[in-house]
Amino acid sequence: IILASDPLNSKEQWLVSLEETIENARRSREEIKAYLQTADSYRWNARTLLNSYLPSFYINYIASGNYQSGCLNEKNPSSCPNTPSTNNQLNNSLNLGITWLFDGGQNAASANSSKSAATANENFAKNAETQAVQEVKTSYALYKNNALALKLASKQLLSAQITSHVTSE
């Protein structure tokens, strides 16, 4: 119950500007973050699927060497000739290739689907951001209207007190 003798003062005041309040709402709304993270996940999934669909090329080089010296192919080392034999062997291999696991375009279609899901989640994030901004603006306007109503009520109370005082004399 509020009596005519009670003061009409608002003790709590919102000192943050509307623009700063809107920016805080954009940063702190969890659903906006969730939509953007989901969109990012779909984009990475699309990249993975597209990379698995495209052919990959490879190049491979292998080199090996073998050197032997002494009495080769002799069962008895004492029968080794005066000039020991040597054996040098060098092997080189260069491989070029292409791999393509063709799936009939299924991964490419799935990649396009993931890109579309990413775009949809980005749009959901924009909608959630717009909704957050609207909620802040509505609340801020309501706060300002209530502050004006409080001032008006204080003036009306003062007027009523003066009228009451004058009529009682």
Image (cartoon, rainbow, N blue to C red):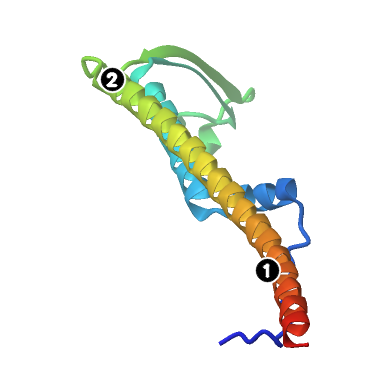
How far apart marks 2 and 1 lie (CA) works out to: 65 Å
Where residue 67 appears, as percent x and y from the top left, is 59, 27
Task: State the residue at coordinates (48%, 40%).
Answer: 125
- Any part of residue 44 in sight: no
Callout 1 environment at 10 Å: few (<14), some (14 to 19), or many (20+)?
few
Name the front one of labels 2 and 1: 1
Q: Which residue is mark 2?
A: 109
Q: Which residue is mark 1?
A: 153
Q: Earlier in the sequence, mark 2 or mark 1?
A: 2
User: Is 161 situated above or below 43?
Assistant: below
Q: Which of the two residues, 17 or 47, is positioned nearer the viewer here?
A: 17
Asked whether residue 16 appears in the rendered view, the answer is yes
Look at 34% across and 21% down and name the residue there: 112
Element at badge 1? Answer: helix
| Image quarter of the C terminus | bottom right
Q: Nearer the viewer, residue 17 or 99?
A: 17
Q: Residue at x 71, y 49 (%)?
A: 18
Q: Amino acid at mark 1?
A: Ala
Vertical placement of residue 32 versus 42, above or below: below
